[in-house]
Image (cartoon, helix red, strand yellow):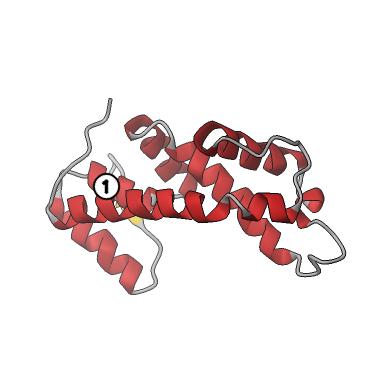
């Protein structure tokens, strides 16, 4: 999502196409600096810009980064993988879920409690992404605030 928002911030449609083609070719994004050299576009660059455009994107990014680490733990019946996350990742997940989805109430939610929120979270993220992709297809822009 942050890549799509980044692309929507670009007014130069040729640059958008170049970056999209880089993605499809499996290459890292590189942009030209003011001195004519190229540098890699990092996730941090995209998150910082996206946060200026859409205030909630950093929360979604941190949620995703923390949540993806749950997939490293597969013995869910014996151990709650949430307990093995770093405290900062737990807080990022809880903060996002509470602010945008109303829970969970406990600071140490069970996997079942977390799972109850996942369909609504992914539906919200995917519906936002779908809207942004349509804007991208229509050559629309997002203004920096």
Residue furthest toward the bottom?
Answer: 25
In the displayed structure, would residue 14 be above or below residue 55? below
Q: How many marks?
A: 1
**Residue 86 lies in what quarter of the image?**
top right
Tell me if 71 is positioned left or right of 120 in this view.
right
Report the side of 24 relative to 120 (left or right): left
Residue 44 image offset from top left, x and y in percent: 48, 43
Outermost residue on the top side: it is 145
Q: Residue at x 34, y 52 (%)?
A: 127
Residue 133: image location, x then y, percent: 25, 56
Q: Is residue 78 above or below residue 3?
A: below
Quarter holding the C terminus is top left
Instruction: Count neighbours of disc 1 (C-alpha within 10 A) and say few if under 14, some if 14 to 19, many if 20 or more.
Output: few
Position of residue 102 in the picture relative to residue 75 (left or right): left
Residue, disc 1: 36
Q: Residue at x 27, y 50 (%)?
A: 132
Tell me what residue is drawn at x 25 percent, y 42 percent: 9
Residue 123 x/y as whole percent: 43, 54
Q: Position of residue 83 (x, y in %)?
A: 81, 49
Q: Residue furthest right?
A: 78
Give the SS element for disc 1.
loop
Residue 98 in view, yes or no: yes
Q: Residue at x 75, y 36 (%)?
A: 106
Frontmost residue, 77 versus 84: 77
Task: Using the image as rendered, state which of residue 14 and residue 76 is in the foreground.
Answer: 76
Asked if residue 41 shows in the view, the reply is no
């Amino acid at each position: 999502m942050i890549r799509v928002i980044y692309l929507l911030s670009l007014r130069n449609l040729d640059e958008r196409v170049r970056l999209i083609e880089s993605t499809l070719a499996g290459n890292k994004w590189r942009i030209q600096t003011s001195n004519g050299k190229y540098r890699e576009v990092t996730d941090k660059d995209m998150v910082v810009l996206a946060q200026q455009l859409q205030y909630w994107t950093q929360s979604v990014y941190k949620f995703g980064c923390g949540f993806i680490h749950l997939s490293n733990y597969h013995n869910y019946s014996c151990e709650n993988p949430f307990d093995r996350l770093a405290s900062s990742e737990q807080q990022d997940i809880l903060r996002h879920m509470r602010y945008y989805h109303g829970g969970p109430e406990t600071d140490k939610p069970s996997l079942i409690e977390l799972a109850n929120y996942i369909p609504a979270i992914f539906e919200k993220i995917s519906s936002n992404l779908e809207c942004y992709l349509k804007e991208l297809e229509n050559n629309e822009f997002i203004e920096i605030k």
